[in-house]
Each structure stands twice: as C-alpha cells, then as structure tokens.
Image (cartoon, coloured by chain):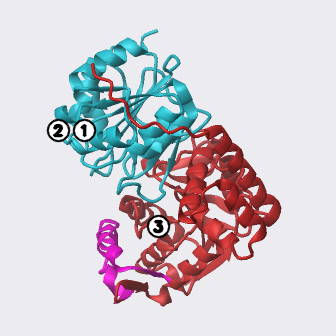
Chain colours: A cyan, B red
Amino acid sequence: MAAPVAIVIGCSAGGLTALEILFSGLLPILPQPIAVCCHTGSATVDLMCELLARHASMPVVEARERAPLEAGVIHVAPSGYHLLVEPSRRFSLSVDERVSYARPSIDVLFESAAEAYRDTLIGVLLTGANSDGAEGLARIRRNGGLAIVQDPADAESPAMPMAALDIAGTDHCLPLAAIAPLLNRLCLP
Amino acid sequence: MNKPAGPVRTTDTALEDIEVELFVRALKLRHGYDFSQYAPASLKRRVLQLVQSQQSGTVSTLTTRLLHEPGFLPVVLEGLSVPVSEMFRDPDVFLALREQVFPVLASYPQINIWQAGCAHGQEVYSLAILLEEAGLYERTQIYATDFNESALRHAQEGIYPAREAQLWSRNYQAAGGRHSLADYYSARYELIKLDQRLRRHVTFANHNLVADEVFCEAHLVLCRNVLIYFSDPLQDRTLALFRDSLVRGGFLCLGTRESLDFSPAAADFTPVNAPLRIYRLGSRTTGVD
C-alpha cells in the first residue's frame, strides 16, 4: 500500500475494552484521522467517547455529518446511524436498513472509506460476536489498502475476526497488544 | 508476525463509479428524477443494493431496465429512498415539540405543519397523536410530502408490522404520551393499522425537495434524516426552501444528527433546543417574537 492517510477501526462485543487498550498504545503524534465503528446498545456514544478519551492521547469525538476527517482525532460513529466517508473525505450519515443486524455497520464505514482512500487506508478489525466488517475489510484490501485483524485466539469474542480472516483474509493477524505498535510503525511519517 | 494469505478478489471500483454515474444520468434523462446531488457514498450503496435485490449482476443491467422496462421506475425509486423510521423516533424530540413548540403554535388560529420526506408516515401519525393530545389538532393542517408515490400510498394506509408496536409504545411513553399507543391502532394478524381518524387533517402530496418549490406557509417544518442524504448544494437549497416556507418565528425540526452549522441558512435560524435540532426562523438580534 501507499503511505497511510487514514485508519478505520471496527469492533463489537468486547470492543470498548479492546479500543481502550489499542488507543492507550497509539502515539499522540500520528497524523492520520481515525474513524471507529463500535456496535453499542446505548442511545448515544457520549459515554463511550468519554471513556475512550481517558485512554487515548488524542481527542475522541462523535463523528458529525459533513465534517471532515481530522488529523490526529478519533471519530466515533453515532449510535443508530451508519457512518460513511464521502469521496470528498468528509463524513456522512445514513439511517438505511441495518446491515448484519447493526447500525452503525462496520461494513458500511469500511466500504465507503475504502472508496475514498483506496490504497492509503488501514482497516483494523477487533473482537466481535458477528460477521460485520468482513465484507468491508475485503473491499479495503481489493482497493489496495491494508488489513489488520485481531488474532481470534486473543479476542474476547472471536467470531468477527474469524469471519474476516475467512472472507477477506488479512495482511496482519496479531494479538491486541501488538496492534498499536504496528500502527505507530506504519503511520509515523 | 504471521501473515495469513486470504482470498482477495479484484474488482474495479472506478468502473463501478462510471456505471453509477450513467445510471443516475439515465434516471434523470429518462424519468426526470435527479439524484445527482445526493451524497455519493450512500447513494452508491443503495444502487448496489438494488443490483443485489434485483439480481441484476451489474449496475449497467439496472440502467438498461430503467431505460426500457415499463414499470421498473417505482422499483428503483423505492430502492433509492429506503424509507426506514419508527413512531416517535427520538422520543426526546417529540417531548420537546410538545413542551417547547406547541405552546407557541397554540397562539395561532390556524396551524400549518409541513413534514418533508414523510416516507412511510410513522412520524406523521406520531405528530397527529401529539397534536390531538395537546388539543390543537382541530385547527391544524399537516402537509406530508415525499417524492416516492409508493411510500406516500404506504403512509396513507398507516399499516405497519406488529413487531414494531412494542418499541413504538415505549417511544410514545417516553415522548410524554398521555394514553396508551394501542388506543390509536387496531391489531390484526401480524399487522397494526393506525386509526384513520388521525388522517383527517393530513394532506399527503408528492413533492420533491430536489426540484419543487414552496407550496405552503408553515408554522412548523419537520424534516428529519432526509438532509443527511444530500450533498452540500442540495442541503443548502432545501434549507432555503424551508426558510421561505416558514412564517416569521416558525419552527424547524431536523434529525438529531443533522446540522445547520455548515449551511448559509444557519444565520436565519435561532436554536430553540440545539441538541435536539429544533430551530426558529429569525435571528436573536432581530427578535423572533
């Protein structure tokens, strides 16, 4: 792939803890914007942003429609909406049908980001109990981007990483603790 | 570090983009429906879903059918509008309408409400119920509009899957409902049908935000989760349309994740309840009252 310009991350069951661990390992000087889709049962992601911000060395905000993806900022998909990246590299939202029973859906974020960033996108798929994200990760790889999947043996819920390995394959399959160091290495200029 | 090799197919997304563009062009030239100003990412997703549901194989096949097959247009429009909603979706918003907006509306002898993009009508009936309970419905006229004829027909029928009723009842209670939602519908088999008396002050009409103009003088415009599908120029056009449709001091209610911030129309509105996206026409300096 070319030099990475953006990072998208997807997770479901067990995702909050996994994200906390991942973000606590990321260097604060990463120049890439990060967009996160984490399935949640709550009506808002305010609390999730707050909890993640305690572990991240960069700001964590809810992604807003029409707003650009900002460098060095972690954007979290709002609850109840699909989060998409437009070709203009700004966010948009949709309330279309659930995908794999989920809204926000990881596939929707990954597939749209794959179109917008092509071979400059890194997709990271972590723990989860369904198969959301697998198609999206496949799209990222087809467009020349790079895939990182949490080792199912290391994941709180292995179903999602397993489905991704099955459907999309991956460029890296790692325990959670090794993912932040890899991102730091790949992403620093 | 292990690097499992996986199956990687190759597709040409650039080709797909060309196909989608031709499809959108065909839809406009052949049938007059212009989707060129929709936000491209979600539009493309919907077109590709249509390819799947129609088992068309490629977008180009859809385009051919769109050009040559009589009766295919409604299928396409239904696929591209994907009307998904609930009754009293975001109950806080309906509670705020009841508590912050209705008391002002009550001062008008005749109340006009425009619900733009009413889709299958869940919010129209929600609104009618709230107005009924506030004692305002007898002097209210609701214009419920959509560009999709089959959605409008669906909205008029007011028939929905019974499995939704539980969530909608919870929403209704959270919105400050005074009775039981079940008082407003009858259930049969797997379906519920909303009390058709709720429709007595509703006019369902075809109106396309992309192309059509102001048609009423409204005291409240509700348009939730429609603008998110539009690109900037179309969002701006639509917000200007709402502004020109509202009486001075009239209310605008958008989806809770929609924003005026990026639009020139922001200057014309004052937030009434910013987190819930309820605004009022008129700036603070000129006064709205």
- Residue B172 on the magenta span: yes
Q: If the image is split into quadrants, where does the C terminus of chain B sit?
A: bottom right
- Residue bounds of the magenta highlight: B158-187
Tell me which residue sits at (34%, 71%) in the image: B168
Indicate which disc, 2 or 1, sits on the residue closer to the N terminus. 1
Q: Amino acid at mark 3?
A: Pro
- Residue A127 marker: 1
Circle 2/circle 1 CB separation < 8 Å: yes
- Residue A99 on the magenta span: no
Q: Which residue is mark 2?
A: A156
Q: Position of residue A13 (x, y in %)?
A: 23, 44
- Please state the chain letter of the residue tagged with numbered disc 3 in the rendered image: B
Q: Secondary structure at mark 2?
A: loop
**Front-lying residue, A71 or B136:** A71
Q: Secondary structure at mark 3?
A: helix
Quarter of the image for residue B249 reads: bottom right
Q: If the image is split into quadrants, where does the N terminus of chain B sit?
A: top left
- Please state the chain letter of the residue tagged with numbered disc 2 in the rendered image: A
Q: Are marks 2 and 3 on the same chain?
A: no
Mark yes or no: residue B109 visible: no
Tell me which residue sits at (49%, 41%) in the image: A111
